[in-house]
């Protein structure tokens, strides 16, 4: 499919949709509403939109208060400023009391591009996964992003929704159903299972094509919920496969790679290769160049899958 | 020495503005508006006020400058290059993969960059730390910092403001780039910081208000600030976002968008005609 839509655009669109269905939806932003696309909601429901200025900690605390008083706040800014910048407000004001705040973080990962490391979140999933009560959702495309926003609006409790800046291929058709807490198979295959999240799902599907040409039968799974996840269900997703790969636009520490390693390590040890950012900060560059530089390409995923299969053969 | 018309410094500022346009155009992204508004302050500091040794950028007694509003990196890089910290030719590598001139300043990469900034609201705290260290070590260096008027919405700025006056840091002079705009619109309509002067005064700072594009006033403000004993100083610099380029001036859209080739040419023609 050639259609490309940024998940942040899908978010902005979905906000207007849920806002018109539910009066309790309120939206907060921290001087980035044009970039996060909350400006769309602001244009339609100005009285339910609060620009909190460049003050993310206060935004999170205010969102907690709104939720405590019965509203369903969606708080948005770039992923770096929605996580590490406000970690204690998220932990103590939102997650600990299990308040109904939705943190919709855009410009996640390295595909922020030219702004560089200060604006690229390579650790946001690790941080959010570690916080009790927090649900962590990473849509793979615009269709899933819209579904995830609808899901978050009706789910009771704090949610971290990870969205991206660039236009990315649309993978799912409108018949798609959001599956909370369970990986879904997006391409079947029997030898090696690639667990991917976010924009790496599309990349993994391309990798599967490369692998097919090389005689490797690869399954691709979309892990759009990083938490809560039933580890047994996750492991079952690789049933019949000899090896597994994780693929994420995030550090290999603490995100999907860790989730997969934890689940398989405890429930069904299998050779594993993790594709992700190797515990370094990002840097300035065009998004495509950075994906190449950090090895987040179909070729790199295919190579990791072959290595995992070879490792299995040696065991 | 400069004559009273500061023609040398003005010329330097104009060259730096031209670099800002060329760099962001070449990069295809970046922040021209907030870079152009701080050029005169940077020029006055680096070419008149600050004691630095570009050939020995880590000289322990150097004056320090912290660009807290890190998105004005193009203006800082252009100033540092013109001051001799690295070749002017390198400016065209702004925001390019593998280069030193990251989208936001990286103190580990660029000679002359004193603090890694980009996440707003953090620079003044680092400046406070430098000023405390300077005093502890009995060194006479001064610390300068530059903040945006949207940036002061961050709570950390006021934590730093409290600390600076609590510790009586008279070796610290901060500038507020009071250009009236942030990303979502005018600062006064997004999250009004007014009254700015009274806030800093209430936090124990000596405050001077100036035209931030008037080199004489900038130099005068630094001079009176450095004479203060026992308190930090804030220079509230009234500025114009996009200063020097007619179609960028006071336009919120030019916050974070690079000029295309044609726009860059037009901007450069205007600047060269000044
Ligand atoms: C903590 C943080 N939040 C948000 C941003 C995104 N951002 C970059 S510049 C900017 C607006 C800055 O406005 P101001 O301080 O007035 O700067 P200027 O007008 O001088 O460009 C914002 C919100 C950021 N860099 N850091
Ligand atoms: Mg401003």
Image (cartoon, rainbow, N blue to C red):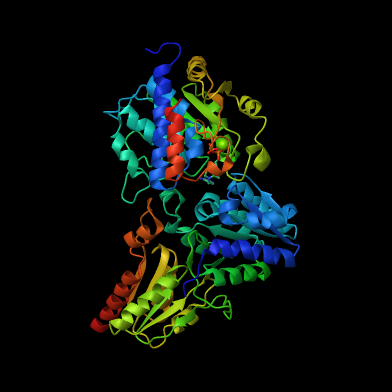
Q: Is residue A122 visible?
A: no
Could you say which is closer to the camera, residue B130 or residue B74? B74
**Percent from the top left, x then y, of residue A207?**
36, 75
At a point 56% along the width and 31% down the height, the residue shown is: B240
At a point 74% along the width and 62% down the height, the residue shown is: A24
Could you say which is closer to the camera, residue A303 or residue B206? A303
B82 left or right of A232? Answer: left
Q: Is residue B54 visible?
A: yes
**Percent from the top left, x then y, of residue B147?**
52, 34
Image region (quadrant) for ligand 2: top right
B44 left or right of B92? Answer: right
Residue A284 higher or lower than B106, as above or below: below
Residue B50 higher or lower than A230, as above or below: above
For the N terminus of chain B, the quadrant is top left
A235 left or right of A174? Answer: left
**Percent from the top left, x then y, of residue A2?**
47, 72
At a point 75% along the width and 52% down the height, the residue shown is: A47
- Quarter of the rendering containing residue B107: top left
Could you say which is closer to the camera, residue A191 or residue B21? B21
**Percent from the top left, x then y, of residue B233?**
53, 23
Could you say which is closer to the camera, residue A26 or residue A132? A26
């Amino acid at each position: 499919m050639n259609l490309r839509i940024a998940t942040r655009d899908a978010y902005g669109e979905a906000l207007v949709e849920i806002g018109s269905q539910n009066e309790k939806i309120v939206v907060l932003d921290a001087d980035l509403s044009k970039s996060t696309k909350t400006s769309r909601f602001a244009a339609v429901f100005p009285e339910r939109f609060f620009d909190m200025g460049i003050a993310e900690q206060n935004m999170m605390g205010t969102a907690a208060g709104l939720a405590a008083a019965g509203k369903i706040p969606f708080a948005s800014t770039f992923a770096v400023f929605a996580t590490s910048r406000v970690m204690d407000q998220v932990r103590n004001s939102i997650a600990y009391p299990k308040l109904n705040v939705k943190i919709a973080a855009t410009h996640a990962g390295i595909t922020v591009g030219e702004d560089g490391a200060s604006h690229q979140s390579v650790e946001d999933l690790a941080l959010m996964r570690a916080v009790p009560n927090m649900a962590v959702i990473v849509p793979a495309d615009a269709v899933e992003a819209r579904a995830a926003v609808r899901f978050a609006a009706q789910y009771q409790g704090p949610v971290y929704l990870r969205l991206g800046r660039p236009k990315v291929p649309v993978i799912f058709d409108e018949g798609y159903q959001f599956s909370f807490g369970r990986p879904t198979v997006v391409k079947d295959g029997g030898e090696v299972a690639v667990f991917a999240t976010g924009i790496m799902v599309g990349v993994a599907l391309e990798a599967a094509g490369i692998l097919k040409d090389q005689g490797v039968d690869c399954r691709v799974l979309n892990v759009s919920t990083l938490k809560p996840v039933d580890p047994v269900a996750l492991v079952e997703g690789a049933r019949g496969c000899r090896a597994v790969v994780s693929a994420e636009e995030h550090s290999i520490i603490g995100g999907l790679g860790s989730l997969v390693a934890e689940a398989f390590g405890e429930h069904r040890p299998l050779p594993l290769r993790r594709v992700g950012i190797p515990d370094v900060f990002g840097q300035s560059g065009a998004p495509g160049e950075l994906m190449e530089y950090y090895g987040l390409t179909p070729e790199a995923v295919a190579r990791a899958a072959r290595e995992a299969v070879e490792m299995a053969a040696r065991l | 020495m400069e004559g009273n018309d500061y023609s040398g410094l003005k010329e330097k500022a104009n060259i730096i503005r031209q670099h800002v346009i060329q760099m962001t155009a070449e990069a295809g992204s970046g922040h021209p508006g907030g870079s152009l508004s701080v050029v005169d302050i940077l020029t006055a500091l680096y070419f008149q006020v600050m004691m630095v040794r570009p050939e020995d950028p880590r000289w322990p007694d150097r004056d320090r400058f912290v660009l807290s509003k890190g998105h004005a990196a193009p203006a800082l890089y252009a100033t540092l290059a013109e001051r001799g910290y690295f070749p002017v030719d390198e400016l065209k590598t702004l925001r390019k993969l593998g280069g030193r001139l990251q989208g936001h300043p990286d103190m580990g990469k660029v000679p002359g960059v004193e603090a890694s900034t980009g996440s707003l609201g953090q620079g003044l705290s680092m400046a406070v730390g430098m000023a405390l260290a300077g005093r502890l070590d009995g060194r006479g260096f001064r610390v300068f910092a530059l903040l945006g008027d949207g940036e002061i919405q961050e709570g950390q700025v006021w934590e730093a403001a409290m600390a600076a006056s609590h510790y009586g840091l008279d070796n610290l002079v901060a500038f507020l780039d009071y250009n009236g705009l942030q990303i979502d619109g005018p600062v006064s309509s997004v999250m009004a910081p007014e009254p700015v002067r009274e806030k800093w005064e209430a936090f124990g700072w000596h405050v001077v208000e100036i035209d931030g594009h008037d080199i004489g006033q900038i130099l005068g403000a630094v001079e009176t600030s450095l004479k203060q004993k026992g308190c930090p100083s804030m220079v509230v610099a009234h500025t114009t976002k996009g200063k020097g380029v007619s179609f960028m001036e006071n336009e919120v859209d030019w916050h974070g968008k690079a000029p295309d080739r044609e726009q860059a040419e037009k901007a450069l023609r205007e600047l060269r005609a000044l």
